[in-house]
């Protein structure tokens, strides 16, 4: 059984910062990718950022320069530092872990940015 536990969401004013964390536990081996997706009301889930086991990263154009993804391989934990938040960043943020042929998702954490 693999669990992804997310934390760090909340309500923040525009221009503020939040840091999301996602810890993977259980029988999980050889994590390849760890990432964050988000889904706003009425919209499809979209990729925010992803990091591979070598530390290479990829970001959605809308968050480049504002968000930073990082990971602690020893703790099987991925982080998302979000700065200069905008109201359009409001969404449920989901952690995603790809390990071999397995794809795991967190329960989601709400991020709300007020104008």
Image: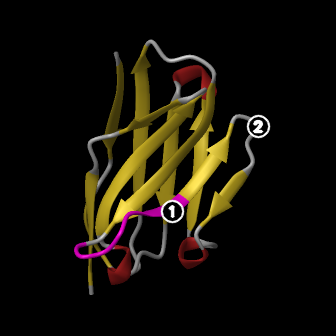
Secondary structure of the magenta portion, mostly? loop
Q: Is residue 67 above or below residue 114?
A: above
User: Which residue bears the numbered disc 1?
Assistant: 48
Residue count near mark 1 (Cα–Cα under 10 Å), binned few <14, some 14–19, many ≥20: many
Q: Nearer the viewer, residue 3 or 84?
A: 3
Relative horizontal placement of residue 27, taking residue 99 as reference (left or right):
left
Relative horizontal placement of residue 5, taking residue 34 as reference (left or right):
left
Disc 2 on helix, strand or loop? loop
Q: Position of residue 80 (x, y in %)?
A: 49, 52
| Image color mode | secondary structure
User: Which residue bears the numbered disc 2?
Assistant: 54
Q: Nearer the viewer, residue 86 or 99?
A: 99
Residue 88, picture quadrant: bottom left
Q: Which residues are magenta?
A: 41-48
Disc 1 on helix, strand or loop? strand
Q: Position of residue 16 (x, y in %)?
A: 39, 72
């Amino acid at each position: 059984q693999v669990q992804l536990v997310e934390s760090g969401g909340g309500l923040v004013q525009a221009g503020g910062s939040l840091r999301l964390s996602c810890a993977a536990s259980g029988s999980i081996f050889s994590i390849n990718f760890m990432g964050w997706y988000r889904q706003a009301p009425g919209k499809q889930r979209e990729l925010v950022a992803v990091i591979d086991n070598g530390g290479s990263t990829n970001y959605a154009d809308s968050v480049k320069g504002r968000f930073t993804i990082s990971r602690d391989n020893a703790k099987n934990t991925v982080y998302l530092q979000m700065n200069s938040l905008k109201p359009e960043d409001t969404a449920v943020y989901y952690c995603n872990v790809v390990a071999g042929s397995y794809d795991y998702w967190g329960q989601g954490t709400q991020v709300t940015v007020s104008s």
